[in-house]
Amino acid sequence: MVPRRYRRRPWYRTRAYRLARTALLVVVLVTVGSRCGSDGSPAAPGGAGGADVVAAPGAGSDPADAEPSDPPTPPPRPLPRSRPMSFRMPFLGIDAPIVPLRLDRNRQLETPPVDKPKLVGWYQGGPTPGENGTAIAVGHRDTRTGPAVFAGLAQVTPGRRIEIKRADGRTAVYAVDRVKVYDKAGFPDKEVYGPTGRPELRVITCGGLFSRRTGYTSNVVVFAHFSATK
């Protein structure tokens, strides 16, 4: 019987090589992990976990040597009462005249005339543009003749600008905060019309599903705050 001949294992299959490879892998993983932020994103230079931090030449670590950031812009002062004249929303291409509105006998806010779908209504019993309080502007989404002034209101996004020209020549500028759609059956009057302690604006039109018998099921409401005077 011929005795079995044993071949010498290659170096890359030896136990010593596997142990050395494992140790090296652990070192690499620990090094990479120490360069990542706690959220898994790459850390900034110097170990910061957010925006890049770069020291000024010769600044050292003294915070007093850093350049001061711009202070936050204070809110504009509320404006005195002045009748609104026109409504402008560049994002939707709206530049429309304003008509005053009142409450009807059922204490419901009137709407602009149906035969003039490009008008915007302003509740004259509430604040005027830029005045402290919650001002209300309404308009039609569409009529039997086609799309009306607020046909695209639901497409407005936060940060968009609304400009209301006043009778005194000044323009109150509002910035959109959010857009909500509410079912008419459960419309939150306090949330929409309630006081906020600063000049704000609500722009309202119809939304939801449409029925020839009952009309639209919902309202689209844009919430905006007074941001500047022009």
Image (cartoon, rainbow, N blue to C red):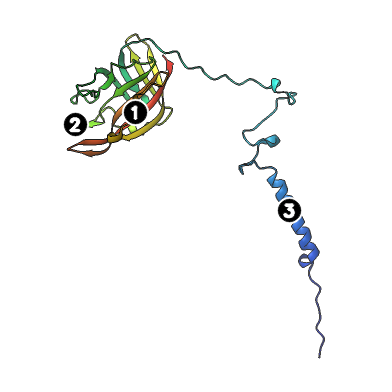
Name the residue rendered at 35%, 26% in the picture.
190
> Which numbered disc, 3 or 1, marks the residue that appears first in the sequence?
3
Amino acid type of the residue that numbered disc 3 sits on in the rendered structure = Val
Q: Quadrant of the N terminus?
A: bottom right
| Disc 3 packing (10 Å; few <14; some 14–19; many ≥20) | few
Residue 61: horizontal and vertical position, in percent?
A: 73, 26
Q: Which residue is mark 3?
A: 26
> Which numbered disc, 2 or 3, marks the residue that appears first in the sequence?
3
Q: Is residue 217 left or right of residue 68?
A: left
Between the C-alphas of marks 3 and 1, the distance is: 58 Å
Q: Which residue is mark 1?
A: 92
Q: Mark 3 falls on what kind of element?
A: helix
Q: Which residue is mark 2?
A: 145
Amino acid type of the residue that numbered disc 1 sits on in the rendered structure = Leu
Between the C-alphas of marks 1 and 2, the distance is: 19 Å
Residue 66: horizontal and vertical position, in percent?
A: 68, 22
Amino acid type of the residue that numbered disc 2 sits on in the rendered structure = Thr
Q: Please tell me whether residue 85 is drawn above or below residue 30 in the rendered image.
A: above
Between residue 101 and residue 125, name the one nearer to us: 125
| Disc 1 packing (10 Å; few <14; some 14–19; many ≥20) | some
